[in-house]
Image (cartoon, rainbow, N blue to C red):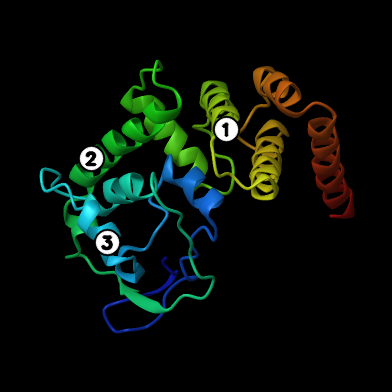
Amino acid sequence: MGTGSHIIDKHGTRVREPRVMPPNHTNIMWQMLFLNPFCHSTTIFKRSLALKHQYDETIAYTQDFELWGRMLQSTKGANLAEPLIETRFHNRRTSHTKYEQQQEIGYNIVNNNLARLLPSKPWSEQNLLGLCNLIKNSWPTVEESATDWSYILKIFLEFSKSDNIDKTTLAEIKKQLLARLALRITPKPGMKPKFELVVLCIQFAGFYCITAIVKSLYIRLTKRFAG
C-alpha cells in the first residue's frame, strides 16, 4: 500500500502538481511493466512479506522497483488517492546525481518485467526507452514510432490474459491507450500521421477505434473553425 506525494523545493514550497500513483492492483501491475508504480517512502506492507521478499543488495539503485515486482507475484497492491507526504526535489538527490546509472538499472528491471509476459521477445535499450516514454507521456511526441505502438499493444494483449486482473480496470486502460493512439494518429504541427498506426488502431479495437478517431478529429476541427 502506498500513496502519492506533493513535490516541494529546497525551501519547502510546493512546486508542481502532486504525484498521483496508480490506484488499484490492475493499474499497478500495468504500470509496473514500464515504470515504478509506488512512491517508495509512502509504502507499507506486512512484516511477513518483507521477510520473504527483501531488497536485492546487488542492485546499486532503484532497488525498490525490482522489489515490488517480486512482491506483487504473491500479493496485491494499492495506492491511496490522497498524497500524504512531501518529496523534496534538489540537485543532490540520488535520482539527479546518479540519473544515468538509475536509468540503466531501471531498463534492466523493465526488461525482466516484460520477460514474464513475452519471454521469447528480446528488448533492446532503444525499444525499452520508446516503451517507457510512451507510457510516461500523456501527450504524443515526435519520437513515438509505429514500432513502439505495435509493441505496446502486443504487451497489453498479453497482459489482459494475466490472472487476478480486474476487467473493468482493464477496459479503462484499453480506452486510455486508444485515446492516446488517436491523438498520435491525428495530424498536429510537426507530426505526420502514420498509416501503420491507423492499421494498428483498427486491428486493436475495430469500430471503437474508428469512433475515437472521428471524435478526436471532430473536436480538433471544431476548435480550428471556432478560432
Sequence-earlier tag: 3 or 1 = 3
Rendered position, 15 above or below 197? below
The residue carrying mark 2 is 105
Sequence-earlier tag: 1 or 2 = 2
Residue name at image x 42 percent, y 54 percent: 37
| Residue 14 image position (x, y, % from top left) | 41, 79
Q: Is residue 33 found left or right of 68 in the rendered image? A: right
Sequence-earlier tag: 2 or 3 = 3
Can you see residue 122?
yes
Q: Is residue 207 found left or right of 91 in the rendered image? A: right
Quadrant assignment for the N terminus: bottom left
Rendered position, 47 above or below 149? below
What amino acid type should be assigned to the residue bearing mark 3?
Ser
The residue carrying mark 1 is 156
Rendered position, 36 above or below 151? below
Label 1: which secondary element: helix
| Residue 137 image position (x, y, % from top left) | 51, 47
Which mark is in front, 2 or 3?
3
Label 3: which secondary element: helix
The residue carrying mark 3 is 48
Which mark is in front, 1 or 2?
1
What amino acid type should be assigned to the residue bearing mark 1?
Phe
